[in-house]
């Protein structure tokens, strides 16, 4: 039987975890911002070896007695223990992604640029050739690494005292089963809506309906190229600054926020946020390219950035760095979804046909949420499966049922969000829909221009991740997280278009 740790031992581990996370974040920043080619996780794990030992995880586990902080530290130690076995694979996958190239139509394309190239190509045949080239590289180079990593993680989970990885997260009090019920209900209640709205939408954009269109066509449609002119690259950062200013935040005066706008060849094209020190050093990394997708990503990451930058320094390590990530994702979604809010569009941009674009945003949200519902149902099974290679057809089945577009079975290993992160996204969509409904009711449809709404939001940001998303929503609106609220939000957006 593992022995509970003393308070002093727990505090030392807590302090060590704080540095461990900061170093991992800094390394991720340097690599994905294109400042450093290699992604050196192993030396960081070596520096904090104590934290990722089996005995440490078991000792913290034995010390959990109802308190949330210790339970979060236990989850962190378990994830660290499991991470130890896969950091070499993760390093290799990141390096392969940065170095592999495909040759398509006589042209060499870096692996990380293939997906953007699919979205940007008007030629259907070329989109298919790009996707097939990507799948070949993934299958040959990455899938053996993903498979080994997942098998090792599943094997080692047993040593942490859980029957399987899904059970481990139930032990961390992840509401996986109640959320899975909500996912099934959401898929049911929006099935007809998706069949009608999705079909009509794809037909209007690309001349192909559900059942005819392939995933590379969907990627093209979601790129939203017809709206590019309305979302110019030069106006991204100014629009963000103005939006934050209305909420009472002066982006440029924030000494704890760094904006990395530099263009480097290996910089990941997608915006991301790295909270190296919370709240003292938060970096928002972007490679502005313009277009609706890029704007969404910027506003999403800005939501994380401001949440972490406003987090109270007096909270504990767990309340700042760990806790319920549906909270930070919820803030990210709140800002991201402004980019298809018709009132925001009219106010911030001289936007043509804002209601049409809002309806498109609602359609896309429906796609995302249905996709994540299917992913969560898949991941719950995947992480309890005795042999994951048998899950390949199940991935295709669940995803096609939800989307009516067939995914590539190549992705059955890679399309997994580590640590059931899909559940946080799903809950964050509900959090956003419910919080937005509350803000509109209390402050009006232009709530984002109201300083008192900004004050409330900044007060809530200061709470970091001390409360769960459910608790925070309860505190503000009196309701708990309901996925069906997202369906209501979507129906409203579609009706206005
Ligand atoms: Zn996010």
Image (cartoon, grey):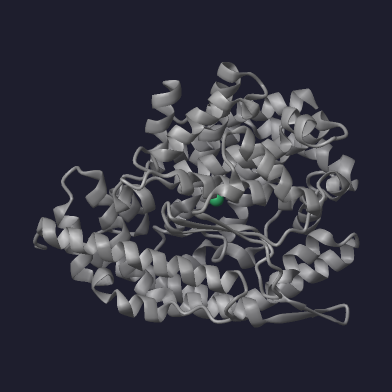
Q: Is residue 250 visible?
A: yes
Q: Nearer the viewer, residue 120 or 13?
A: 13
Please indicate whether residue 445 sits to the left or right of residue 351 in the image.
Answer: left
**The C terminus appears in which quarter of the rendering?**
top right
Residue 221 point in image, percent of width and height: 81, 50
**The N terminus appears in which quarter of the rendering?**
bottom left
Which quadrant of the figure has residue 241? Answer: top right
Q: Is residue 309 above or below residue 495?
A: below
Which quadrant of the figure has residue 158? Answer: bottom left
Residue 376 point in image, percent of width and height: 50, 48
Q: Nearer the viewer, residue 383 or 75?
A: 75
Residue 363 point in image, percent of width and height: 73, 37
Please indicate whether residue 18 sits to the left or right of residue 37 in the image.
Answer: left
Image point 52% across, 45% down: which residue?
A: 306
Q: Is residue 366 visible?
A: no
Q: Nearer the viewer, residue 20 or 107?
A: 20
Residue 164 point in image, percent of width and height: 33, 59
Which quadrant of the figure has residue 345? Answer: top right
């Amino acid at each position: 039987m593992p022995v509970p740790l003393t308070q002093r031992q727990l505090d030392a581990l807590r302090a060590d975890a704080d540095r461990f996370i900061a170093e991992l974040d800094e390394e991720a920043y340097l690599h994905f911002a294109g400042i450093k080619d290699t992604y050196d996780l192993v030396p960081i794990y070596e520096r904090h070896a104590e934290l990722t030992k089996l005995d440490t995880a078991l000792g913290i586990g034995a010390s959990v007695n109802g308190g949330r902080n210790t339970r979060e530290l236990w989850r962190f130690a378990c994830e660290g223990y499991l991470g130890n076995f896969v950091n070499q694979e993760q390093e290799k996958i990141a390096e392969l992604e940065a170095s592999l190239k495909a040759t398509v139509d006589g042209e060499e394309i870096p692996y990380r640029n293939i997906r953007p190239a699919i979205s940007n190509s008007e030629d259907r045949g070329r989109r298919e050739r790009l996707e097939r080239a990507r799948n070949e590289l993934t299958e040959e180079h990455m899938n053996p690494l993903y498979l080994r990593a997942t098998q090792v993680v599943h094997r080692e989970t047993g040593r942490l005292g859980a029957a399987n990885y899904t059970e481990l997260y139930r032990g961390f009090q992840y509401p996986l089963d109640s959320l899975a019920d909500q996912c099934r209900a959401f898929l049911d209640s929006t099935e007809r809506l998706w069949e009608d709205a999705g079909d009509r939408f794809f037909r209007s954009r690309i001349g192909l309906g559900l059942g005819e269109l392939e995933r590379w066509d969907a990627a093209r449609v979601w790129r939203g190229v017809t709206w590019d002119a309305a979302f110019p690259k030069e106006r991204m950062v100014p629009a963000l600054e103005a939006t934050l200013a209305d909420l009472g935040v002066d982006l440029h005066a924030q000494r704890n926020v760094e904006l990395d706008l530099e263009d480097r060849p290996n910089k990941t094209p997608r915006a991301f946020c790295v909270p190296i020190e919370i709240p003292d050093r938060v970096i928002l990394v972007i490679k502005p390219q313009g277009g609706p997708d890029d704007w969404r990503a910027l506003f999403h990451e800005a939501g994380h950035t401001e949440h972490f930058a406003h987090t109270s320094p007096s909270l504990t390590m767990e309340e700042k760095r760990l806790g319920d990530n549906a909270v930070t994702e919820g803030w990210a979604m709140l800002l991201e979804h402004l980019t298809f809010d018709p009132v925001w569009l009219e106010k911030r941009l001289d936007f043509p046909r804002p209601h049409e674009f809002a309806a498109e945003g609602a359609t896309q949200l429906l796609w995302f949420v249905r996709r994540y519902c299917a992913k969560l149902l898949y991941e719950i099974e995947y992480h309890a499966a005795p042999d994951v290679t048998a899950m390949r057809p199940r991935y295709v089945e669940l995803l096609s049922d939800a989307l009516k577009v067939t995914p590539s079975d190549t992705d059955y290993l890679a399309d997994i969000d580590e640590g059931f992160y899909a559940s946080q996204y799903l809950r964050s969509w509900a959090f956003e829909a419910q919080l937005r409904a509350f803000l509109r009711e209390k402050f009006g449809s232009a709530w984002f221009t109201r300083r008192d709404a900004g004050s409330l939001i900044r007060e809530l940001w200061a709470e970091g991740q001390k409360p769960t998303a459910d608790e925070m929503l309860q505190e503000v609106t009196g309701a708990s997280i309901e996925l069906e609220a997202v369906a209501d939000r979507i129906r409203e957006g579609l009706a206005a278009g």
